[in-house]
Amino acid sequence: MKKIIVAITGMLMFSSCSNFDEINTNPNTPTGVSASLLATNIILSIAKYQGTDSKEYIAENALPKYVGYANEGQLGTQYNLIANSSFNKMTILPDIDKMLLAAKGNPAENSYKGVGHFIRAYTFYLLTMKMGDIPYSEANLGTQGNYKPKYDSQKEVFMGILSELEQARIDFSQGTAFDGDPTIFKGNPERWRRACNAFELKVLMTLSGKESDADLKIKEKFANIVNENILLKDDSDYFGLEYNTVNLHPLYSTNDMFTGRTILSDIVVDNLKRLNDKRLFYFAEPSADQIAKGLAQNSFMAYTGVKTSLDYGLMNANYSAGKYSKINLRYQTKQNSDPRRLLTYAEQELILAEARIKGWITASSAQLYYENGVKAALKNVMSTDASFAHGNAIVQNDIDTYFTGEAAFAADADTQLKQVWIQRYLLNFLVDAETSYFEYRRNKYPDFNIDPTTNLNVNSPTSMPIRYLYPSSELNYNSQKLMEALNRQFGGYDEINKTMWLLAN
C-alpha cells in the first residue's frame, strides 16, 4: 500500500511540474500592465498638475506676476528667487517604452506610438525651456548601462522635439481610437493629431528668435501646419484635464491662511480694467477697502491689485487694511473652478495672429485670429459658475462687443503684438504659469515692474532670472557631462541669469 501511495504522489508531482505556472497564476490578477493603463499614467504625467500642494501652485503663479502673497512670510518667486530644477519628469520615459511594447499588435498601436512621441516632446520641451542643454539623445538608456547621458545642445533638443511631434502627427493619422486616455479627447486620434499641430505651432513660436536658422526651418514648418488646417477647432477643444471629485483643483478646500491670502497683481487687474474685460469678476474678489467706500462689487473700480515688487512688510500691512483684491473664492470652494487647459484653441488662434503679424503666414487675417482667440478665452470663463462673478457675469453680448477702445485691434504691428501677448498672458491666469514665464522671457512683456531694492535676483537686481539651475544631484552622479554642458553654454558657471541658446541673439 505504501508503494502505491508513493507512486501516486510521484505522478501528481510530475503532473504539477508540467503546468506549475498555469496552476499558480491567479486568473484575477494581471500578469502584465496593459498599454491602456500605462497610457493613462503617461498622459497624466503632463496633463495633471504635478506639484505637491496649494502653496507650490501659488508660488508657480507668483513668478510670472499673476499674484502676490500676504501670508506667513515672503514668497521667493514673487521676488524672483528661483533655484534648481529637476529631471524627475524623465522618469516617465521607461513607461513609454513599456507602453509601446505592450501595444505591439494592438489595433491602436499607432495611436499609442503617437502618445509616446507627444509626451516625450512635451517633457523635453519643459525641461529644456527651464534649463537649456539637457540629456535627450542618451536619455532613458539606463537599461543599456548608460547612467551618465550626455547633454545635447538646446538646438539639437528642439530639433528632436519637432521631429517627435511630426512623427506623432503621422502616427495619429494612421491610428484608431485607443483606451486609457483621461483627457477630453477620450482616445480620439484625430483630436490628438490636432493637439500635436497646436503644440508644434507653440514650439515654433517659442523659437521665433531663431526664425532665420536654416536648420530649423521655422517659418516653413509653421506655414505647412497652417496650410494642412488640422488644428484645434473651437473653445471647447483643449489638451489638459478636467478637475472633478477624484482630481481636485490644487486650490480647492485649502487653508484660508494660504490660498485665501493670495492677492491679484496690478498687472492682471489693471489690464482687465483697461480692456473693460469682465474676466476680472471671475478672477478676483473686490477690495474690502473699496467696498467700504461705497463701491459696488460689480464695479471695475472696486478691484485693486498689488504691485508684486512692493516691499513685503508694506504689502502685508496694506493687505491687512483691505486694500487689495484676493483671488476669487471659487478657487477655494469649487472642485473644478477651471480645467487645466495646457493647449487651447484660444492660445492657438493668438499664436496664429502673431505669425500673421510677423508675415510667417498669409492665411486669413491677424485681426480675425486675434478676435477668435479672445472670444474663445472669454467663452471659457463664461462657462464657469456665474454665481461667483459678483453680479457682473459675462454674457454673449460682452463677447460680441468686446473689441472696442483698448481692445480694438490696432493699426500698427508693434501695438498688435502687445495686444496678442497680453491676451495670452491673461488667458493663462492661474492655469499655465510656466508658459507665461517663458513668454515673458521671449517678449519682455508685460512689464513686471522689477524693483532693485526688493529683487532677490541678487546677481542682476534690475531683471528677472531667465533660467533654472540644473538639478544639484547631477554634480554627484553626472558631473563630467554636466560640466561639459556648462562650459559649452555658460563659461562653466550654473547661474540663473545665464543666457541659453534659445534667448541668445
Image (spheres, rainbow, N blue to C red):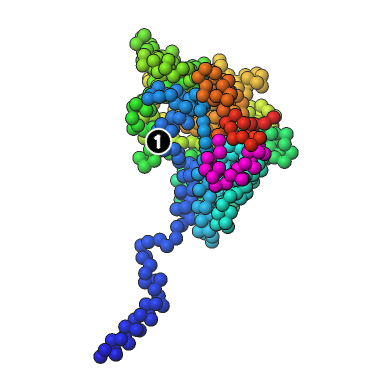
At x 25%, y 90%, the residue is 1
Q: Which residues are magenta?
A: 469-489
Asked whether 481 falls inside the magenta stretch, the response is: yes
Q: Is residue 404 toward the left or the right of residue 298 in the image? A: right
Q: Nearer the viewer, residue 290 or 160?
A: 160
Q: Residue furthest left?
A: 1
Where residue 245 appears, as percent x and y from the top left, is 35, 40
- Is residue 318 one of those drawn in magenta? no
Q: Bin the neighbour count of mark 1 within 10 Å (Cα to Cα): few under 14, some 14-19, many 20 and up.
A: few
Whether residue 287 is visible to the viewer of this picture, yes or no, is: no
**Relative to 391, is 343 on the left or the right?**
right
Q: Is residue 447 above or below residue 39?
A: above
Image coords of residue 41 (percent x, y): 46, 48
Q: Who's the residue at 62% across and 22% down the image?
A: 416
Helix, strand or loop at disc 1? loop
Residue shown at 47%/27% (left/top)?
Answer: 76
Q: Residue furthest right?
A: 214
Identify the residue at image location x=45%, y=46%. 182
Residue 10, image quadrant: bottom left
* Quadrant of the image containing the C terminus: top right
User: Is 81 on the left or on the right of 3, as rendered?
Assistant: right
Rendering quarter of residue 314: top left
Front-lying residue, 448 or 358: 448
Does the magenta stretch mainly form a helix, a strand or a loop? helix
Instruction: Judge whether 18 appears above or below 322 on screen.
Output: below
Residue behind mark 1? 53
Residue 236: percent from left, percent from top: 49, 36
Coordinates of residue 479 in the picture (x, y in percent)? 58, 44
The type of residue carrying mark 1 is: Asp
Numbered disc total: 1
Q: Nearer the viewer, residue 296 or 312?
A: 312
| Residue 251, visible in the rendered structure | yes
